[in-house]
Amino acid sequence: MKRQNLLLLLAALAIAILPLFIIRPPAGDAAEIFTGADGQAETVITGLRPDYKPWFAPLWEPPSGEIESLLFGLQAAIGAGLIGYCLGFYRGRSNPQ
């Protein structure tokens, strides 16, 4: 069991770390390669139709990209915590000690 857990831990570390070394930015393009899907979609849309105007504007925009990243990370952490709590709750409920 410990060996299996160690292998899973090593696989998780490899999946998290290897893309940082394997993925290279395109030559001559200084753009960030780990951008979100929204930014990539906006780039494609403005490339296809430069006169496109969005029909919806967000109610509030964060004052900076860092705050936007912070809120996104906080949202992901809350979601992961909620999923972990539910999994633990139902597992504990099915195996009372």
Image (tube, rainbow, N blue to C red):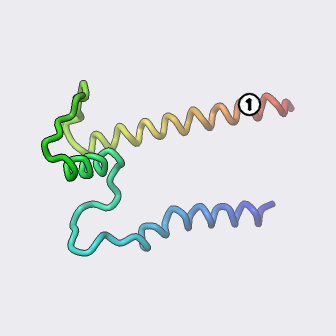
Q: Which residue sits furthest top?
A: 59
Q: Residue at x 34, y 41 (%)?
A: 70
Residue type at mark 1 is: Tyr
Place of residue 23 in the rendered image (x, y in percent of width and height, measured from the top left): 40, 70
Q: Quadrant of the N terminus?
A: bottom right
Q: Quadrant of residue 13?
A: bottom right
Does 37 sit above or below residue 52? below
Does 1 sit above or below residue 38? below
The residue that mark 1 highlights is 90
Depth order, front residue of 40/51: 51
Q: Residue at x 22, y 29 (%)?
A: 55
Q: How many marks?
A: 1
Place of residue 85 in the rendered image (x, y in percent of width and height, measured from the top left): 63, 33
Depth order, front residue of 7/2: 7
Q: Residue at x 24, y 51 (%)?
A: 43
Q: Residue at x 51, y 62 (%)?
A: 16
Horizontal relation, residue 30 to residue 6: left or right: left
Horizontal relation, residue 94 to residue 25: left or right: right
Alpha-carbon neighbours of circle 1 within 10 Å: few (<14), some, or many (≥20)?
Answer: few
Q: Quadrant of residue 7?
A: bottom right
Q: Quadrant of residue 89?
A: top right
Does 91 sit above or below residue 27? above
Horizontal relation, residue 20 to residue 32: left or right: right
* SS label for mark 1: helix
Depth order, front residue of 41/3: 41
Q: Quadrant of the C terminus?
A: top right
Place of residue 82 in the rendered image (x, y in percent of width and height, measured from the top left): 57, 32
Q: Which residue sits furthest left?
A: 51
